[in-house]
Image: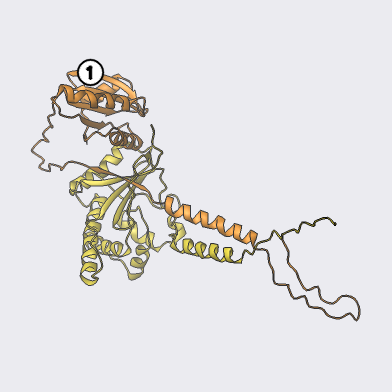
Amino acid sequence: MAELNQDSGKKGKGGKVRSKKNGGKVDLTAMVDLAFLLITFFMLTTSLNKPQAMDVAMPDKNKVKDEPQPDLLTADNRSLTVLLGSDNKVSVIYGQVKNPIEGPTTVGYGADGIRKVLMEKKAYVPRVAGGKDLIVIIRPSDKSTQRNLVDILDEMKIVDVKRYMIAKISPEEVEVLKRDNIYND
Amino acid sequence: MGKAKVKRASTSIDMTAMCDVSFLLLTFFVLTATARQPEALTVDTPASTTKDKLPDSNVGMITIGDGGKVFFGTTDQQVRVKALERMSAKYGIGFSQEDYDHFKLMENFGVPMSKLKGLLALDGSKRTEKGVQTGIPIDSTENTSNELYYWVQNTRLAAEEVNKEKESSDKNFVHPGPLKIAIKADANEKYPSVNQVIETLRNQKQNKFSFITGMRAEEK
């Protein structure tokens, strides 16, 4: 394939100088290969470069210091509290933390852990709460990581929970995590 | 009868046209690709199944990583300059024209206001060296000690100003709305440092923001 015809110049003594006429053909295969490789590289890096954005909305903050933040009251049989602990584990409580209907249960993230619980509760709650849907309260503890928070928000999207909020964890809830040994550094 | 000779067709094809096209495409992609500036703080974001992409402009990005260090940056150069002007007035620190020119090209940074001038004087490659940028001071207050609070606030104001200006001077310009705030936190960053940033945003009623995440294939 590769051929690069060059004028070899004078041959022998006194021979006629012959100039070849078809000397301009260069094999371009390798060049095309290289060009396409670079095209692929630039195409992939430009489109895959864009990061994903997960939108989060927080409730408006009550800035009056003297007035304590009112604890949002949610119906016991609709609320599922998810406490984010350490070691990629969560504690799930159905109902009130002090007086739970179910739990606290320690589960992991992913399809076999929290998603199963969420799916089950999402189907169960409308039946007991007169058609009203599930409310999930996410309380990240100080030992949880950003990955845990993103994971749990992602689960909300996957399971399609319409009502959820991120809230502050209370000392009693930290106790729950400590008891279940998922509050380690 | 003699043997029928199979004429061998030449296998070489003229590649010139193909070469032309591929180089044209190559040139296009090279020119449209934005050169990635070295990041002052490299973070490994967690993955999610979210498909929404972050817009290219009108974004203020807060980066958290390396044990709670906070960095800040804006996508638009004009906004950067206007924000620094406001910050300069707020903290009473003057900057030279050269400083502004350097700041304009800085993707993000993480130093206290008092050390910003020193950072701008450094060479571009030295700025990203380890230990040079220690993070923007942040706390739970709304005082000047919480510098991130004022960086975000002034950048939001600057973005509004720049967008208004563009809207009045350019008929085709569509106001993109208020500045979007994105938080890019390391996957292993503990919640308290992320929470402090979120609270800082909430204190100025910036209740909506985005978490930057990587891509993950959807699980069944």
Colour-to-chain, yellow: B
Classed neighbour count for the residue bearing mark 1: other residues with Cα under 10 Å, few (<14), some (14–19), many (≥20): some
Locate the C terminus of chain B and report the quarter of the image it occupies: top left
The spot of residue A173 in percent (x, y) is 23, 25
The spot of residue A103 in percent (x, y) is 25, 18
Q: Which quadrant of the structure image shows residue A88?
A: top left
Of A94 and A62, which appears nearest the observer?
Answer: A94
Give the residue at mark 1: A102
Q: Compared with residue B210, is residue B8 higher up or lower down, i.e. above or below? A: below
Of B190 and A135, which appears nearest the observer?
Answer: A135
Which secondary structure, mark 1?
strand
Q: Is residue A31 left or right of residue B212?
A: right
Of B201 and B55, which appears nearest the observer?
Answer: B55
Colour used to depict chain A in the structure image:
orange
Q: Is residue B1 left or right of residue A140?
A: right
Residue lying at the far left of the rendered structure: A67
Residue lying at the far right of the rendered structure: A13
Q: Residue at x 30, y 40 (%)?
A: B193
Amino acid type, residue under disc 1 in the picture: Glu
Locate the N terminus of chain B and report the quarter of the image it occupies: bottom right
**Which chain letter goes with mark 1?**
A
- Is residue A72 something that shows in the picture? yes
Q: Residue at x 11, y 40 (%)?
A: A65
